[in-house]
Amino acid sequence: MTEPAVSAEPGVVRASGLDGQTEDFAQQIADQVESFLLALRAVAREAEGGSAVSLLLLEISQVLLAGARLGAQQDFVPPAEYQPDVGPEADLDRLRLRLAAILDGVDAYSFVFDPYVPEVVESTLSDDLTSVAGDLENGLRHYRRGNVREALWWWQFSYVSSWGNLAGAVLNALLSVVAHDRLDAEFEGEDEQVAAADQMLGGESTDRP
C-alpha cells in the first residue's frame, strides 16, 4: 500500500514513489472527478426538467475530458495484485431514483455499446449516470487514502472498460434531447420520444412543411 506523504497544500495528496508530474496529473483528475460527483448530486437534489438536461450535458462532457486524458496516458500499473480495501461502496440508490424522477420521459434510451459488435443495448440515463458515478467514486476513495497509483489505475481501467462508454452514450442521449427540442427534428417512429424531449425542455413544437 502506498503511503501518503505530508503535503503543505490542503486537499492535495502526495504519494511516495511517484514523480511530481504524475502526482499533479492525479490531483487534476481527482479534482475533476470530485467536481462531477458534487454536481451530479446537486442536479439530483435541486434541478428540474430542462435545466437538469443542460447541466448533465455539461458535467458529463467535462468528466469525459478527464477520461480522455486518462486514455492518452501510458498504462498505469497497480502496486499490488488486489485492490486495497477502501470500505463499503457508496449507497447511490437514492441518487439513481432522484435522477430517474427528474428525467422521467427521457430516462429510457438505447445505444450501441461496441460499434464493432452492433448490438443495441436498452438502458436508462439514471442507471448509467449512477454507474459512472460509482466507478469514479471508487477511484476517489483510493486517492483520498493515499493510494494514488491504485486510483489512477482504476480510473484508467474503468474508463476503458466501462464508464467511458456509458458516459459517451449518456452524452449522445442528452444531446439528442437538446437537438429534438432546439431543431424540432422529426423522426419516423420516434414521436413519443420527441414529444417527451420537447416537454422536458419546455419547448413548443412547430410543424415543418
Image (spheres, rainbow, N blue to C red):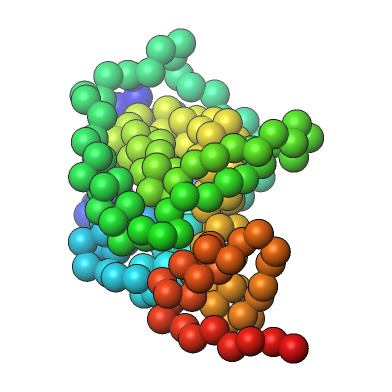
Q: Is residue 87 left or right of residue 39?
A: left
Residue 4 higher or lower than 195, as above or below: above
**Residue 171 placement (x, y as % from top left):** 55, 58
Q: Nearer the viewer, residue 152 or 58?
A: 58
**Residue 98 placement (x, y as % from top left):** 25, 53
Residue 151, image quadrant: top left
Residue 12 higher or lower than 172, as above or below: above
Answer whether residue 23 is visible to the viewer in this image. Answer: no
Q: Residue at x 69, y 67 (%)?
A: 187
Residue 169 higher or lower than 196, as above or below: above
Q: Residue at x 43, y 54 (%)?
A: 107
Residue 165, image quadrant: top right
Count of labels shown?
A: 0
Taking the view exactly as shown, the residue that stands out farthest to the top is 81
Which quarter of the rendering shows the N terminus? top left
**Residue 4 placement (x, y as % from top left):** 29, 33
Q: Residue at x 54, y 40 (%)?
A: 122
Q: Residue at x 46, y 11 (%)?
A: 81
Q: Nearer the viewer, residue 14 or 115?
A: 115
Q: Is residue 153 left or right of residue 5?
A: right
Taking the view exactly as shown, the residue that stands out farthest to the right is 116
Residue 64 higher or lower than 22, as above or below: below
**Residue 70 placement (x, y as % from top left):** 57, 44
Which quarter of the rendering shows the C terminus? bottom right
Answer whether residue 57 is visible to the viewer in this image. Answer: yes
